Amino acid sequence: MTRTLHSLQRIETFAQEIKKSRFRALAGPVDSEQAVRDFIAAYADTGANHNCWAWRVGQAYRFSDDGEPSGTAGKPILQAIDGQALDGVAVVVTRWFGGILLGSGGLMRAYGGTAATCLRVADKQPIVLRLKSVIRCPFSDFSLVKSRLLGCADVRIDHEAFVSEGVELTLALPQADLAAILAMVVDLTAGRVVILGEDEATSLSPAPSP
């Protein structure tokens, strides 16, 4: 069974000391590579010894050891993200060296564990897989159709275009309910709504907060 993906509702932090080195994780929601760059720039501490990080946005991901031995920091942070089925998340783990070497295994546990604890205590929200659909409805049905669509959970109207035949709506519909929602608007208008295109694009979006 596929696990439901989640993102974070807000920025979370967690800090701990391990053999005199101080580790601090900062985790937050991101939706693009530019947002990731901004997050890292904002929360990396230039006065620390290392600012290691990892992020995932959909199929895209990156990680950095920032001077720590290869594979001991960035990858464990990414594994903490993936291990908790998170997406649209960036984590920066900063280390202030305390004078005691931790070894490769110790570093992996320190970075991965600090990130994992930070993510575990963070407030999360489910991510809804939405599919793009385009419909056209007559002007006489527009208000009713729009009202019903906005009353459906996790439905998003991305664009409205007025054309000679009526109104074209570009919708982002939850994958699990797509067929039922499209059938509902067709029945609601006695077949006057026309489905112009469906399943054209996918997007991962956080579900609205309650």
Image: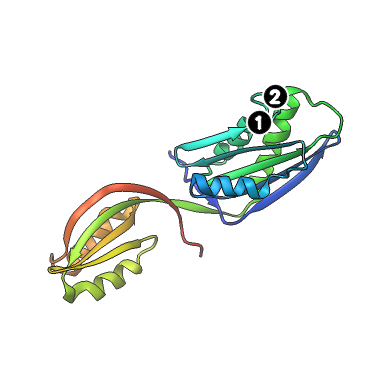
Write the residue at 72% across / 47% down.
Answer: 14
Position above or below: 28 against 137: above
What amino acid is at disc 1? Answer: Asp
Q: Residues within 10 Å of mark 2 (few under 14, many from 20)?
A: few
Identify the residue position indicated by label 2 in the image: 69
What amino acid is at disc 2? Answer: Pro
Q: Position of residue 36 (x, y in %)?
A: 55, 46
Position above or below: 83 against 121: above
- Looking at the image, can residue 164 be seen? yes
In the visual, does 191 lie left or right of 182? left
- The span from disc 1 to disc 2 (Cα, nearest Å) is 7 Å
Write the residue at 54% across / 35% down.
Answer: 62
SS category of the residue bearing label 2: loop
In the visual, does 12 lie left or right of 145? right
Q: Position of residue 43 (x, y in %)?
A: 67, 48
Write the residue at 25% across / 74% down.
Answer: 144
Identify the residue position indicated by label 1 in the image: 65
- Between 200 and 189, the one lying in front of the other is 200
Q: Where is residue 187 in the image (x, y as percent from the top left)?
A: 18, 65
- Between 101 and 32, the one lying in front of the other is 32
In the visual, does 99 lie left or right of 200? right
| Tags 1 and 2 touching, CB below 8 Å | yes
Using the image, tell me which numbered label, if any, was put on residue 85. none
Write the residue at 63% across / 38% down.
Answer: 53
Q: Quadrant of residue 162?
A: bottom left
- Between 130 and 68, the one lying in front of the other is 68
Q: How crowded is mark 1: few (under 14 residues within 10 Å), some or many (20 or more)?
A: many
SS category of the residue bearing label 1: loop
